[in-house]
Image: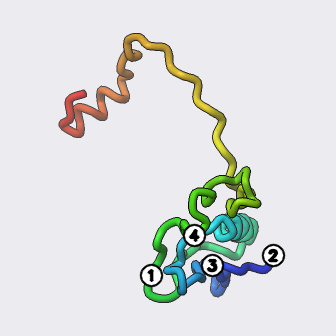
Amino acid sequence: MTFREIRYDVEDGVCTVTLNRPDRLNAVTTTMLGELGEAWDRADADDAVRAVIVTGAGRAFCAGADLGAGGATFDYRRASAGGAPAPHGLRRAPPTPPRAAGPLPPRTTATAAASSRSGSSI
């Protein structure tokens, strides 16, 4: 895969992934998310890679999400409206069923021990 919005380099066991949209302060797009997923898979499959560094080109690491597509920015179902298909590795979690109202479950020993060590009272 040829990357358009990131750079991927491996040298001496170090993989450097560079967010490469300096004109937009490296704001994240769905294309970039897909490329990052591919980069993680590629680094994971390469036994020579011992460390991964993530950096940004230009004067900013990352400005957050690129909202240039307006309201369709995160709407993966409406690619024609400016949204995009869900990038590689990004899947929606199944909906969480509502929890029945009622008392909370009892604290476990591990929770109680962690609470007492931190000085917190739950």
- In primary-sequence order, the first of circles 2 and 4 is 2
Looking at the rendered structure, the kind of residue marked 4 is Gly
Mark 2–mark 4 Cα distance, whole angstroms, equals: 25 Å
Mark 4–mark 1 Cα distance, whole angstroms, equals: 18 Å
Q: Is residue 13 visible?
A: yes
Marks 1 & 2, CB-CB < 8 Å contact:
no
In the image, which is nearer the foreground, mark 1 or mark 2?
A: 1
Alpha-carbon neighbours of circle 1 within 10 Å: few (<14), some, or many (≥20)?
some
**Residue at 44% of width from left, 81% of height from top?**
60
**Residue at 66% of width from left, 35% of height from top?**
94
Residue 7 versus residue 115 in the image, above or below: below
Kindly identify which residue carries mark 2: 1
Residue 117 versus residue 62 in the image, above or below: above
Mark 3–mark 1 Cα distance, whole angstroms, equals: 20 Å
Image-quadrant location for residue 41: bottom right
Mark 4–mark 3 Cα distance, whole angstroms, equals: 30 Å
Kindly identify which residue carries mark 4: 68
Kindly identify which residue carries mark 1: 60
Kindly identify which residue carries mark 3: 15
In the image, which is nearer the foreground, mark 2 or mark 3?
A: 2
Residue 122 versus residue 79 in the image, above or below: above
